[in-house]
Amino acid sequence: MTVSALSEAPPALGTGALLSWRRLRFTLVTSVLIGLLLGLHWDSGLASALVRTLAVGLAAMLAFGVFERWPRRLPAWLVRWVWQVVGVALSVPASAFAIYAVSTRDGGPPFWEVPARLTGFLFLTFLGLLIGPWAALAALVRQKEALARDQRLAFDLQRSELERQALDARLRLLQGQVAPHFLFNTLANVQALVETGSPEAPVVLRSLIAYLRAAVPRLQEPLTTIGQELQLVRAYLELMRMRMPDRLQFAVHADEGSLELPCPPMTLLTLVENAVRHGIDPSEEGGSIEIDVERRDGRCLVRVSDSGIGVQDGSAGLGTGLATLRERLRLVFGEDAHLHLSPGVVGGAVAELDLPAREEATG
């Protein structure tokens, strides 16, 4: 009956919580069930029992909601939940008294002078006091549990968002390190041509400018595609071949199905630039670079092999380029991406990259 106080949602500041559907539904269902049980033994009949239990239940529900937010500030010695339980307890005899007083016939004696009616009033009040405060306590427990659950979910969501922002910041920092690393290496190559008075210097410089106009904006993108990476790789190798036409050959082989797969910007270019700088350039004879990209069994397999001087002792890291690339791959793919550098079978070095073949939007 007065179990109207039970609410399955945490308290709110608006009127929605005061008249929430869950509270009203629980009040109506429980009050009707109790009214049906009382109606079996009351002389006034089933309808009278239902009306009285519903009225007391609704009054207790309203008291629980009102004291939930009024007054907005309580004395320090009085906690809100005690105030609500006391309010529910006080509403039960008050509402029961009002019901019996209103239902007294005009000219008839007060209900407390009629033993049967007084007994009904006392029984209704006793039952309300027995159920109402406990129902209010149960509602408060449910509210606190729901509030704690919502706060926990909000905290987890906030923590996930902060972790994502930290990863994005770390990735942007690493991508920012790629730009100067690549630019300094490329400009050093152009400087060498200028210092030697090579007639190819203006051509190389124009090609470099055109290349950088296409490449640099992509440094700020979170992801690019294998196909876009291969376009940059071909442009870079053509640029390097202008610088050392007799010492560099290259070949690119890629599955059509791998071209739209995502990867961090400058991934393939870092591997190729590493092969040129540490393999082909230091070798007097130069060499060749072969790039193979294959999609197989849900993976994207990239292999960059060169016939240069090979992997020297203690050079497994080979500068900041591969170290930065490893970190960027970890931030994007977690532990699902692998980069391995090893000596070639007949000399040179082989860089093997194993990525998940996830087809998702880039940029």
Image (cartoon, rainbow, N blue to C red):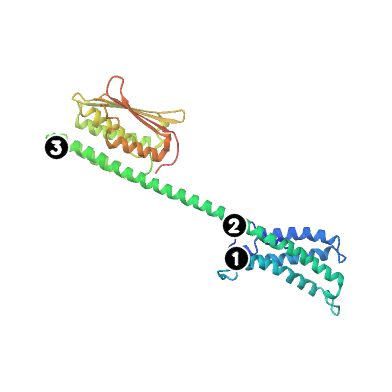
Q: Which residue is mark 3?
A: 194
- Whole-number angstrom distance, CA of label 2 to CA of label 3: 75 Å
The image quarter containing residue 36 is bottom right
The image quarter containing residue 26 is bottom right
Is residue 195 visible from the viewing direction of this image? yes
Q: Which residue is mark 2?
A: 144
Residue 309's disc is none
**Secondary-structure class at tag 2:** helix
In this view, which residue lies farthest toward the right?
A: 43
- Viewer-side residue, 353 vs 18: 18
Q: Which residue is mark 1?
A: 80
Report the amino acid beneath label 2: Lys
Callout 2–callout 3 Cβ contact below 8 Å: no
Give the class, few, some or many, for how many residues have Cα within 10 Å of label 2's Cα (few <14, many ≥20).
some
Q: Residue at x 71, y 65 (%)?
A: 58
Q: Position of residue 326 (x, y in %)?
A: 35, 36
Q: Identify the image quadrant of the C terminus.
A: top left
Lower sequence index among marks 2 and 3? 2
**Secondary-structure class at tag 1:** helix
Q: Position of residue 336 (x, y in %)?
A: 43, 34
Q: Residue at x 78, y 58 (%)?
A: 33
Give the class, few, some or many, for how many residues have Cα within 10 Å of label 3's Cα (few <14, many ≥20).
some
Q: Position of residue 129 (x, y in %)?
A: 73, 64
Q: Is residue 57 left or right of residue 323?
A: right
Q: Residue at x 64, y 61 (%)?
A: 20
In this view, which residue lies farthest toward the front?
A: 77
